[in-house]
Image (cartoon, rainbow, N blue to C red):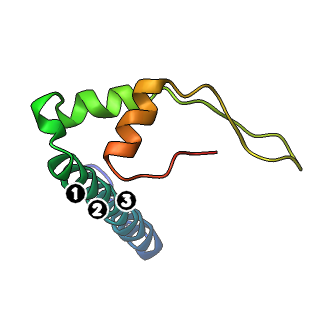
């Protein structure tokens, strides 16, 4: 006969909290995705890009952070600058 172990109630609470946090992250992601889609539609970027290909173009901007110093961004290509402007998004400085 195998022994049945009881699961402490606190474990159920922790699992529930993890689930709630995952749902929040998913909702935030959907909000961003919806905004990007809206911007792409307004700028008629769907003629040239899919959402994935546009995000790939904008994905390579590097950011450097040093303690007690201003946040520094790496090089932003002219194509990236154009895409940001078309979407009505301020460039990172």
Please report the residue visible at 52 percent of the width from the left and 45 percent of the height from the top.
Answer: 91
Q: With 2 as the anchor, is 92 left or right in this view? A: right
Using the numbered discs, state the Cα–Cα distance from disc 2 to disc 1 in whole angstroms. Answer: 5 Å
Image coordinates of residue 58 in percent, x first then y, are 41, 32
* Element type at mark 3: helix
Q: With 86 as the anchor, is 59 left or right in this view? A: right
Please report the residue visible at 21 percent of the width from the left and 46 percent of the height from the top.
Answer: 43
Please report the residue visible at 24 percent of the width from the left and 32 percent of the height from the top.
Answer: 52
Image coordinates of residue 15 in percent, x first then y, are 38, 64
* Element type at mark 2: helix
Q: What residue did someone put label 2 on?
A: 31
Residue closest to the eye, 33 or 42: 42
Image coordinates of residue 93 in percent, x first then y, are 64, 45
Q: Is residue 27 above or below residue 57?
A: below
Residue closest to the eye, 48 or 52: 48
Q: Are marks 2 and 3 in contact (CB under 8 Å)?
A: no
Please report the residue visible at 22 percent of the width from the left and 57 percent of the height from the top.
Answer: 34
Residue at the left extreme of this rendering: 47
Q: Are marks 3 and 1 in contact (CB under 8 Å)?
A: no
Q: With 56 as the anchor, is 63 left or right in this view? A: right
* Element type at mark 1: helix
Q: Is residue 10 above or below residue 53?
A: below
Determine the image quadrant of residue 17: bottom left
Q: Are marks 2 and 1 in contact (CB under 8 Å)?
A: yes
Residue 25 tag number? 3
Q: With 75 as the anchor, is 5 left or right in this view? A: left
Determine the image quadrant of residue 28: bottom left
Using the numbered discs, state the Cα–Cα distance from disc 3 to disc 1 in whole angstroms. Answer: 14 Å
Label 3 environment density (alpha carbons within 10 Å; few <14, some 14–19, many ≥20): few
Which label's residue is closer to the chain start, 3 or 1? 3
């Amino acid at each position: 006969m195998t022994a049945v172990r009881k699961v402490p109630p606190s474990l159920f609470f922790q699992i529930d909290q993890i689930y709630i946090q995952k749902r929040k992250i998913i909702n935030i992601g959907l909000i961003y995705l919806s905004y990007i889609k809206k911007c792409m539609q307004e700028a008629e970027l769907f003629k040239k890009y899919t959402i994935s290909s546009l995000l790939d173009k904008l994905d390579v901007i590097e950011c450097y952070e040093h303690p007690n110093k201003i946040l520094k961004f790496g090089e932003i290509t002219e194509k990236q600058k154009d895409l940001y402007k078309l979407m009505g998004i301020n460039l990172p400085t």
